[in-house]
Amino acid sequence: MIYDLQGQAGMSPVVGMLYSAVRKNSHRLMSITDGMSQEEVDYKGPDHKSNSTAQLIKHITYVDLNWVYRIKELPLPQSLSEQYGPMIDENNRLPKVKGMSLSTLMYNYEQVLNRLETVCMQLTDADLDKVVNFGHDNEKQATIRWGIWHMADHSRYHQAHINQLRKWSTLNKEGIR
C-alpha cells in the first residue's frame, strides 16, 4: 500500500490537501472505534477519571463544528451549539456523555465533516491566509490554513487517548488492571 496525501477533487490544491488530512483522520477514527461496545464507548479508564471515548468524539465534533463556522466567518447558530455542545462543563472539563451510541456519535461527526467539505469546496488557496478568532473567548487568532490543519491534528491527538482507553478496557476485562 502506498500512502500519499492527495488533494480533494474540486478543491483548490492546498485547501484540498488540508481537507484530505481531516478526512483521512476521520477514517482512522472510524477504524480505531470499529466494534466498540457501549460499555467501551463509555469507559473512563481504570481510575474512572479519564475522558471516555464518547466524550472525546463529541469534543472533536464540537471543536470541528466551531471551526467550520469560523471558516465561514459566521457565528455558530445557537441551535447547533445546543445540539453538539457545550465545549466544557461548569468545572472546565469535557461534559459527561453517557449512553450515547457510537453510531450516533460518528453520525454527528460525519455531518460536521460534510459541512466542512461544503465550505472547503468554496475556498481558494488565497482564502487560507484569512485570520479568524478562536479560543474560549475568541482571544486567539489563526489563519484558516492553521484551523483546517488543527482539525486534523486535534483529532489524531484524541485518537491516541481513545487507543489508550481501548487498551485499558481490554486489560480491565481480563482482570489485569
Image (cartoon, helix red, strand yellow):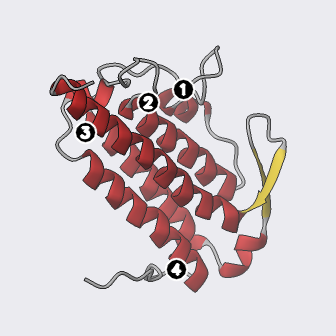
Name the residue located 17 percent from the left edge and 26 percent from the top edge.
173
Which of the two discs, 1 and 4, sits closer to the camera?
Answer: 1
Q: Secondary structure at mark 3?
A: helix
| Cα–Cα gap, marks 1 and 4 | 34 Å
Q: Could you tell me residue 20's position as x and y percent?
A: 46, 72
Q: Which residue is mark 2?
A: 55
Q: Quadrant of residue 91?
A: top right
In this view of the protein, which residue sits in the foreground, 17 or 113?
Answer: 17
| Cα–Cα gap, marks 2 and 1 | 7 Å
Categorize mark 4 by other alpha carbons within 10 Å: few (<14), some (14-19), many (20+): many
Q: Are marks 2 and 1 in contact (CB under 8 Å)?
A: yes
| Cα–Cα gap, marks 3 and 1 | 20 Å
Categorize mark 2 by other alpha carbons within 10 Å: few (<14), some (14-19), many (20+): many
Q: Earlier in the sequence, mark 3 or mark 1?
A: 1
Q: Which residue is mark 4?
A: 11
Name the residue located 68 percent from the left edge and 52 percent from the top edge.
70
Which of the two discs, 2 and 3, sits closer to the camera?
Answer: 2
Q: Secondary structure at mark 1?
A: loop
Name the quarter where the N terminus is drawn: bottom left
Q: Which residue is mark 3?
A: 103
Instruction: Please state which amino acid type lies under the numbered disc 3.
Output: Ser
Residue 143 visible? The answer is yes
Q: Could you tell me residue 36's position as x and y percent?
A: 21, 38
| Cα–Cα gap, marks 2 and 3 | 14 Å
Q: Earlier in the sequence, mark 2 or mark 3?
A: 2
Q: Earlier in the sequence, mark 3 or mark 4?
A: 4
Q: Which residue is mark 1?
A: 94
